[in-house]
Amino acid sequence: MDRIRLAMACINSRIGEVECNAGTMISFMEKAAESEADLICFPEMCLTGYSMPRSFDYCLGEDSPAIGRIL
């Protein structure tokens, strides 16, 4: 059976600061790659930050530059 090395990221996202959060995610991705992780998991809404009253204000489309940076 093949094994998968999983990295888990715990991020303190800044609400509405998408580019800052994307940079933080990329840093975690680089560290996970250095540790030879096959997959990294991030918390929900870590790119936009979690704020229920304003969640729709921070929705991103699939063509968002921040999403492109992460992919």
Image: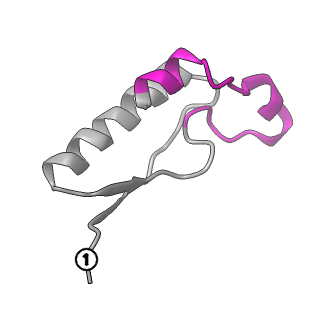
Say which residue appears at 82% left-offset and 30% top-offset: 56
Say which residue appears at 26% left-offset and 84% top-offset: 1
Looking at this view, is 50 or 63 the one in front? Answer: 63
Read off the residue under disc 1: 2
Q: Is residue 10 left or right of residue 7?
A: right
Q: Quadrant of residue 18?
A: top right
Say which residue appears at 14% left-offset and 48% top-offset: 34
Q: Position of residue 70 (x, y in %)?
A: 42, 30
64 relative to 11, above or below: above
Q: How is the image coloured?
A: one colour
Q: Is residue 39 left or right of residue 71?
A: left
Q: Does residue 59 show up magenta in the picture?
A: yes
Looking at this view, is 4 or 26 the one in front? Answer: 4
Q: Which residue ends up furthest to the bottom in the rendered image?
A: 1
Q: Can see residue 10? A: yes
Say which residue appears at 55% left-offset and 41% top-offset: 46
Provide the secondary structure element on which disc 1 rests.
loop
Magenta segment: 47-69
Q: Is residue 53 left or right of residue 21?
A: right
Amino acid type, label 1: Asp
Q: Does residue 5 show up magenta in the picture?
A: no
28 relative to 48, above or below: below
